[in-house]
Image: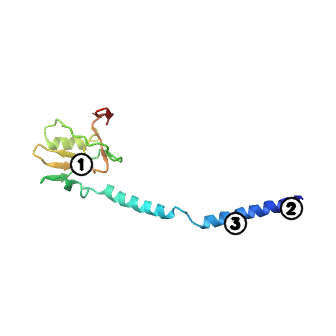
Amino acid sequence: MLKHFDMRVTSRFNLFIIAALITSCAGNKYAKTEKVYKNQAKEFSNLYRQSPVSGQLEKVNVKDQQWIASINFGIRKPNFVVIHHTAQDSLGQTIRTFHSAKAGVSSHYVVGRDGKVVQMVNDLYRAHHAGLGKWGMILI
């Protein structure tokens, strides 16, 4: 009786091993989508790497435009567009402030009194705002 039981256990174990081998040889069922994911991530990384970013500043319909990169930004996409006055003496002074690691602030675009537009952060990144802001009941 014990010998018969051992044979059943052994044959079930062998079936389990065969099934495991077959499924492992079948390949990753998500291999195609993982390949698409990797290709898409590579395309996005090329977009995020651009400096200046093609197609963003061109959407601003002014003649005097410039790209000056800021170091104060993060990887999450922005949720809001915040427009505020910096109360500084000039466009150059604002740009210097937005380049300061000590100040730690930036913006996507700076508009000078003469209408000149300077893009400082890729639209895909989040610029560092100068502290908490509020829109209605929402903290930003």
* Front position among marks 1 and 2: 2
Residue 38, percent from left and from top:
43, 61
Nearer-N-terminus badge (2/3): 2
Rendering quarter of residue 72: top left
Relative side of 92 to 125, left or right: left
Three-letter amino acid code at the position of disc 1: Met
Using the image as rendered, state which of residue 56 and residue 137 is in the foreground.
137
Residues packed near mark 2 inside 10 Å, few (<14), some (14 to 19) or many (20 plus): few
Name the residue beneath numbered marker 2. Answer: 4
Nearer-N-terminus badge (1/2): 2
Q: CA distance from mark 1 to mark 2?
A: 78 Å
Residue 95, percent from left and from top:
20, 44
Query: Does the CB distance between marks 1 and 2 fall below 8 Å?
Result: no
Q: Is residue 70 above or below residue 134?
A: below
Q: Secondary structure at mark 2?
A: helix
Task: Give the position of the N terminus as an image quadrant.
Answer: bottom right
Task: Give the position of the C terminus as an image quadrant.
Answer: top left
Rendering quarter of residue 18: bottom right
Three-letter amino acid code at the position of disc 3: Ile
Identify the residue at horizontal 24%, vertical 48% (top origin).
120
Q: Secondary structure at mark 1?
A: loop
Name the residue beneath numbered marker 3. Answer: 18
Q: CA distance from mark 1 to mark 3?
A: 60 Å
Using the image as rendered, state which of residue 131 and residue 83 is in the foreground.
83
Q: Which mark is residue 120?
A: 1
Q: Secondary structure at mark 3?
A: helix
Query: Does the CB distance between marks 1 and 3 fall below 8 Å?
Result: no
Identify the residue at horizontal 59%, vertical 67% (top origin).
26
